[in-house]
Image (cartoon, grey):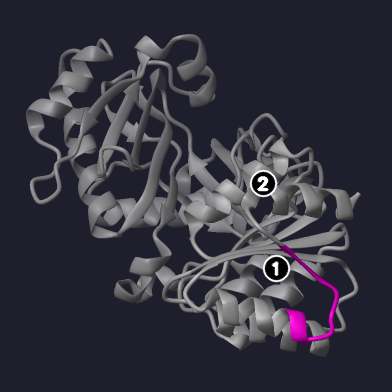
Amino acid sequence: MKIHEYQAKGVLRRYNVPVPRGEVAFSPDEARRVAGTLGGRVVVKAQIHAGGRGKGGGVKLADNPEQAARLAEQIIGMTLVTHQTGPEGRLVKRVLVEETLPIDRELYLGIVLDRKLERPVLMASSEGGMDIEEVAAKTPELILKETIEPGIGLMPHQARRLAFGMGLEGEAVKGIVNAMLALAKAYEATDANLLEINPFVITTDERAVALDAKMDFDDNGLFRHPDLIELRDLDEEDPLETDASNFNLNYIKLDGNVGCMVNGAGLAMATMDIIQHAGGRPANFLDVGGGANAEQIKNGFRIILSDANVKAILINIFGGILRVDVLAAGVVAAARELDIQVPIVLRLEGTKVDEGKRILQESGMNFTVAANMKEAAEKVVALAS
C-alpha cells in the first residue's frame, strides 16, 4: 500500500525523523492560510502516488500567500504526467504547502528489502535529487549500502560509515546519523516495503532534513496498523487492482493482450517471461494464491476480461494446496457464467491433475490444454494474434 508524501512525513515525524513544516491543502484558500502560517515563502507540491512531479510541473515556489493560492489553483485539478504515471497521468486533488529551506547539499537515503540477502538494506548516495536508477547505472560506486540485521537494527557505526562515505563532516554527520537511525526504526515499526527520501538535504546551517518522503507498506502487515490503513487513497489506485484486492487476488495491469491467471508469484513471473519469449505480451499479473476457490477464480476471470485488450487467457497452475480438479471445476463454472468468448489455454500440473483434465474435457467447452509451459505460451500467443 502506498501513501502520499504528506502522509509519509506525518508517519516519519512519529519516529523523530526531521521533516519541513507544512500542511496539506485541498483548495487555494487553504494553501493561502498555510503559507501565511509558515511565514510566506513556501513550496507548493502536487500530491499523487508517483515520482517526477517536479519535472511534470507539479512542484512550484511561491514568494507569498497570494502566490501560493494561485499556484494551488493551477495545480489542483490538473492531470499531472510523469515518467511514473504513464501518458494518462494522474488527477491532482491536493497539494502539500511546505516551508522552504536553505539547502547546501542534496543526498539520497532509501531502505528496501533485499530478497536475496533476506534483510533490509539502507542505501545512501551523495547524488540526491536525481533519479537513483540513473545514478546506479552510470556511477554505481556512489551508491553506498549497509545491511540491517533483523532483531538488532541499524547500528550507529553503520550510519556513521555512510555519512563519512557521502563526504559529510561536522554537525551534519551527527544530524544525518540520527536521521538514519530514526528512518530504520520507522521502516521496521511500520512493516514497510520501501522508505525513500530523495532528496535528504543538509541545510546551510548543517541541519539534516527529509525534503521528500515515499513509503510503501507490506499489505500482509497492515492488520497490525489500523492507523496506516486509514491513509489509503483508493483514488490513486487502479480500479481493477482495488477490485482484485477485495477478493484476495494479487493483480497488476500491464499493456499486453494475453491475460494470465497463475497460482504463486514466482510462477506468475515465469509465465509472463515465457509469454514474452514466445513473442507475446502479458496483459496482467494475476496470482490467485495457493488456496483459491471457485469464487476467486470467477472474479479473476472477470477482472482479467475487464481489460478490453485481452484477446486470450493463459491459466498456469501447479496444484499443491490448490487441487487441479477444484481449479478445473471453477474454470468451467466461471466460463459458463461469464460467457467467456476469448480462447483459454491451460497448463496444469500437480495434485489431481488427471481428474482436472477430465473435467475440462467433459465440459464440452473449447479449452486448449498444453503439455508444458513452452507449448502453453506458444499456443496462447498464437490465439491472441
Give the magenta range: 361-369
What residue sits right under mark 1 in the picture? 240
- Percent position of residue 354, x then y: 58, 76
Using the image, determine if residue 160 lies above or below residue 345: above
Disc on res. 335: none
Residue at the disc numbered 2: 374
Q: Is residue 370 above or below residue 141?
A: below
Seen at 28% across and 34% down, the residue is: 122
Q: Secondary structure at mark 2?
A: helix
Q: Please name the residue shown 65% across and 86% down the image.
A: 329
Q: What's under tag 2, amino acid-wise?
A: Lys
Question: Can the viewer see residue 116?
Answer: yes
Residue 246 located within the stretch drawn in magenta: no
User: Image check: 281 left or right of 324?
Assistant: right
**Along the line of sight, the residue nearer the viewer: 206 or 159:** 159
> Going from the N terminus, do you reach mark 1 or mark 2 first?
1
Name the quadrant containing residue 242.
Answer: bottom right
Residue 199: x %, y % from top left: 44, 29
Viewer-nearest residue: 256 or 70: 256
Query: Residue at coordinates 14% horizontally, 23% vertically from top-left?
Result: 160
SS of the residue under disc 1: helix
Q: Is residue 78 left or right of residue 113?
A: right
Give percent across and percent down for residue 330.
Answer: 65, 85
Mark 1 and mark 2 in contact? Answer it, CB < 8 Å.
no
